[in-house]
Amino acid sequence: MAAALPMKPGKVGVEEAAETVHRIRITLSSKNVKNLEKVCADLIKGAKDKRLKVKGPVRMPTKVMRITTRKSPCGEGTNTWDGFELRVHKRVIDLHSPSEVVKQITSITIEPGVEVEVTIADV
Amino acid sequence: MGQKINPLGFRLGITQNHRSYWFANKKYSKVFEEDKKIRDCIELYVQKHIKNSSNYGGIARVEIKRKTDLIQVEIYTGFPALLVESRGQGIEQLKLNVQNILSSEDRRLRMTLIEIAKPYGEPKILAKKIALKLESRVAFRRTMKKAIELAKKGNIKGIKIQIAGRLNGAEIARVEWAREGRVPLQTIRARINYCYYAAQTIYGVLGIKVWIFQDEE
């Protein structure tokens, strides 16, 4: 039953008693799926290396923002339309770990174009 | 007859990268405005300090990447010696200017100068050179031919230049273009670089469009 907790009491240190385990939610958003998946994979690998309990990347539905305009500057001609869209992809990763470790992990993997938001819900 | 889509936008996912690469949700318009201000500031700096009758700056493009609390501005230039001030200061002055413009939150700014190997293989630099010549009233056909010669020195597979407006000061405006090699605009996997630049002459504005076909894939 103690095996369910990620931080085993094996590591006896001076500050060990002060580090409480938080439920940490990392939300990653981006316009680019490849970069996003890469950052996800890096974060999860980093967390697994430190033997934290990780709830894998939950993929939120993609938000598509569509702007549909007439191609023509005047009203003449066949009605041709431009359909521009911007896709926002969102992934959520849950960790159980003290906040310092999380700061370490998130500081390593930052790619341009991916927004990382960390919220801490105290258990 | 149809109209042509901008070849840069056409290839954005595939052979072309975004020039500004960041993500913003609620503050999209503010970040966008900041990007524009940075680019304007760089353009202004080049015009004031570097441009004179024989130079024209030579900046091909400015790429802006943002991470949380770091703004990375990469200036691709064909002639870095012009931008680096003597006395070994580098681009300190430019960096200061840009930093003043940014709403000073705690964000670091990193500005790097990247040199392009064959500057006349970049359409923006070529277009600016043509504009300079046209503004000093050189005959446009000769300018186009010379520009094509310059570009061919790099290894490109095709180039097309189009100039529109009051050519040679004529009363009736027209469009003239010159092409060398092949420029397959319909092929998405062809890496085509494009630029539009307006030359301000005493007769009005001459629009210069340059397409350069670099390689396939």
Image (tube, coloured by chain):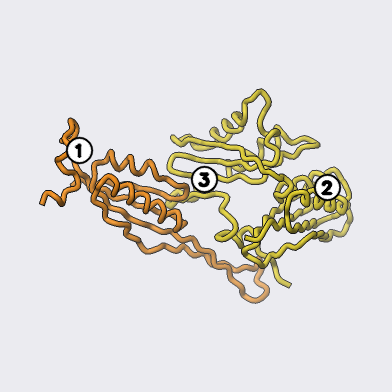
Q: Which chain is orange?
A: A
| Amino acid type, residue under disc 3 in the picture | Lys
- Of the chain colours in the picture, the one used for chain B is yellow
Q: Which residue is mark 3?
A: B65
Vertical relation: B196 (above or below) B2: above
Quadrant assignment, res B170: bottom right
Between the C-alphas of marks 1 and 3, the distance is 36 Å
At horizontal 24% and vertical 48% (from top left) the residue drawn is A52
At horizontal 71% and vertical 45% (from top left) the residue drawn is B118
Q: Are marks 3 and 2 in contact (CB under 8 Å)?
A: no
Mark nearest the camera among 3 and 2 is 3
| Amino acid type, residue under disc 1 in the picture | Glu
The answer to whether B166 appears left or right of A28 in the picture is: right
Q: Which residue is mark 2?
A: B134
- Residue neighbourhood size for the residue with mark 2, other residues' Cα within 10 Å, grouped as few (<14), some (14–19), many (≥20): many
The answer to whether B132 appears left or right of A85 in the picture is: right
Between the C-alphas of marks 3 and 2, the distance is 35 Å
Q: Chain for mark 3? A: B
Q: Are marks 3 and 2 on the same chain?
A: yes
Where in the figure is residue B30, as x and y percent of width and height?
49, 46
Mark nearest the camera among 1 and 2 is 1
